[in-house]
Amino acid sequence: MKFEQEQLSQKLIEELLPILIPHSEEVELDKDIPLDVAWSKYSFLQENNAMVLYTARNDEGVLVGYASYFVNPNLHYQSSLQATQDAIYIDKECRGFGRAFIDWCDSQLRNMGVQKVYQNTKAVHDFGPMLATLGYRAEDIIYSRRLDLSEVS
């Protein structure tokens, strides 16, 4: 498996789409909200050093996983550069290298000067126990609520 940081391009977006869809189908609770990625905003963030995208490719060079992180000084601790995982996914047929991939991503983020990394897991696909083996600690629990927009006045 080869891990690398990549820049968003039309070619990479075309490679991402075949695994973005199964990723969304696997983890999204509200399946009626269509996947509609704001690629131009991701590109803007990446161009301004506020987002990084890491990829995992098999020996044939086929994209089988990705991890994206928003990287910014924390608004509460502005002298601390911190990264928040936006999305992480490994194709179901290729799983087994997730720990190595996250560890590699962390080393890349450390080299950028990131002091703290936040990883998000879905409750139905909690990989927290694996994160704990890398030194992560449970810090926040996030709840979501679907609002009925027909009640808008």
Image (spheres, rainbow, N blue to C red):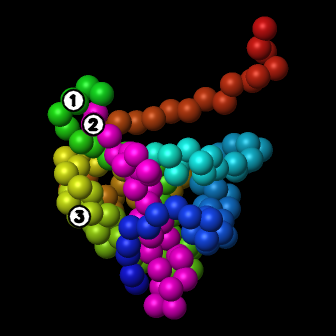
> How many numbered dots are placed on residues in this image?
3
Separation of disc 2 and disc 3 at Cα?
A: 18 Å
Separation of disc 2 and disc 1 at Cα?
A: 7 Å
Q: Is residue 138 visible?
A: no
Q: In the image, which disc is placed on residue 77?
A: 1
What secondary structure characterizes most of the magenta part? strand
Q: Which residue is mark 2?
A: 73
**Mark 2 falls on what kind of element?**
strand
Q: Residues within 10 Å of mark 2 (few under 14, many from 20)?
A: some
Q: Quadrant of residue 107?
A: bottom left
Q: Earlier in the sequence, mark 1 or mark 3?
A: 1
Q: Residue furthest top?
A: 153
Is 48 left, or right, of 23 in this rendering? Answer: left
Q: Is residue 79 visible?
A: yes
Is 102 left, or right, of 135 in this rendering? Answer: right
Separation of disc 1 and disc 3 at Cα?
A: 21 Å
Please name the residue shown 19% across and 47% down the image.
115
Which quarter of the rendered picture does the N terminus lie within?
bottom left
